[in-house]
Amino acid sequence: MSMDTWVLVTDARHVGAMLAAARGLGTPVTAAVVGSRALAELVAAAGPDTVVWVEQDAQIPVEAYAARLAAAVVLAAPRVLISSTAPAARVLLGAAAARRGSVVLPAVVDLAADGDHLVVQRSAVGGAVIETLETSSPVAIVFTGEDVEAPVGSPAAIETIPADLPASDLCLIRTEPAGGDSSGVRAAARVVSVGRGVKSKADLPLIEELAAALGAEIGCSMPVADDLGWISKDRYVGRSGQHIAPRLYVALGISGAPQHMEGIRDAKVVVAVNSDKDAPIFRTADFGIVGDLYEVVPALVAALGTT
Ligand SMILES: Cc1cc2nc3c(=O)[nH]c(=O)nc-3n(C[C@H](O)[C@H](O)[C@H](O)COP(=O)(O)OP(=O)(O)OC[C@H]3O[C@@H](n4cnc5c(N)ncnc54)[C@H](O)[C@@H]3O)c2cc1C
């Protein structure tokens, strides 16, 4: 088995972080790019030893190239495969891992080499714990660690792999805006967001009252949509949800996990209400209110003059 690492790339997001993590293992790094020549060149300049590139036809989805890429991975037999959380990249990772016989590990935030072993840290239980795992077998990793700037250096050579598409007539015939609920959150100038500090779905009218007083859309943290199902999934904010840029973001009972804060990086003013004075969200909020949201929210509504 080769000790190499392959980083599978379908778009420019998180490339710096994935390549930095791969380089940290101290073994040769190949970036396998499915996409445009421009993407392959961008990745080549970001620090891999080699780039293998499958040119994507703009009318054919990246997923159609999964079998081709998996065949290339089997030939090279790298020890570690890494992808970002981008849906198409994860499809490539899954296909390559299945052919390669690698175990797939999601939500990996850090990895390191320890002699012959790979030590992997991943987030589990909705981000509440970090698990450390160790293996000497092939693994495929969905990397969610902190993003970093890619270094600027002399670009790696780009080797083209013929696409050799399978016998499929899958092609893209139309792209149009999805519309739906989330467009409200995405475009909103003000967002009031619900976290797990809200104790019950029956309490949502209290939050809606504040949103109405501010002329704001309702958003939420991931667990409120994903685990509790109180608010539709296209309204949760964060790394794996909506990335929004409102003028005002009011976070109610949200702790401020990095994955959540990523979604509001471009918000102009962040106001946090949290009963824990040490909640991480206070480190980045512009205005913080330490208090019980069940007392603070009615007071805000009253101050806004709607009751
Ligand atoms: C790969 C991955 C991707 C993720 N992507 C996202 C994402 O896109 N978006 C996202 O949101 N999360 C995401 N998460 C989950 C994230 O790590 C956190 O678990 C989540 O954001 C926590 O949600 P929360 O702040 O609502 O809940 P908690 O962390 O449980 O925080 C609740 C907060 O409410 C406060 N509180 C409790 N009672 C009150 C009260 N009465 N009044 C005021 N405050 C109160 C508490 O002090 C606490 O700070 C992701 C996790 C992983 C592993």
Image: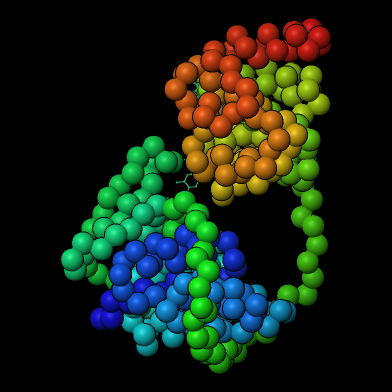
x, y percent for residue 215: 81, 26
Q: Vertical placement of 29 versus 229: above or below?
A: below
Determine the image quadrant of residue 71: bottom left
x, y percent for residue 272: 60, 24
**Residue 187 appears in the picture as rendered:** yes
Horizontally, is 116 left or right of 110 in the view?
left
Q: Vertical placement of 276 versus 260: above or below?
A: above
**Residue 103 appears in the picture as rendered:** no
Q: Nearer the viewer, residue 23 or 296?
A: 23
Which residue is pictured at 36% across the width and 85% down the height?
76
**Colour mode?**
rainbow
Determine the image quadrant of residue 138: bottom left
x, y percent for residue 259: 51, 43
Q: Residue farthest to the front?
A: 153
Which residue is pictured at 52% across the width and 29% down the height?
283
Q: Nearer the viewer, residue 2 or 91?
A: 2
Which residue is pictured at 79% across the width and 19% down the height?
213
Which residue is pictured at 64% across the width and 81% down the height?
37
Determine the image quadrant of residue 162: bottom right
Q: Quadrant of the C terminus?
A: top right
Q: Residue farthest to the left?
A: 115
Horizontally, is 202 left or right of 140 in the view?
right
Q: Quadrant of the N terminus?
A: bottom left
Q: Vertical placement of 187 versus 207: above or below?
A: below
Total numbered labels:
0
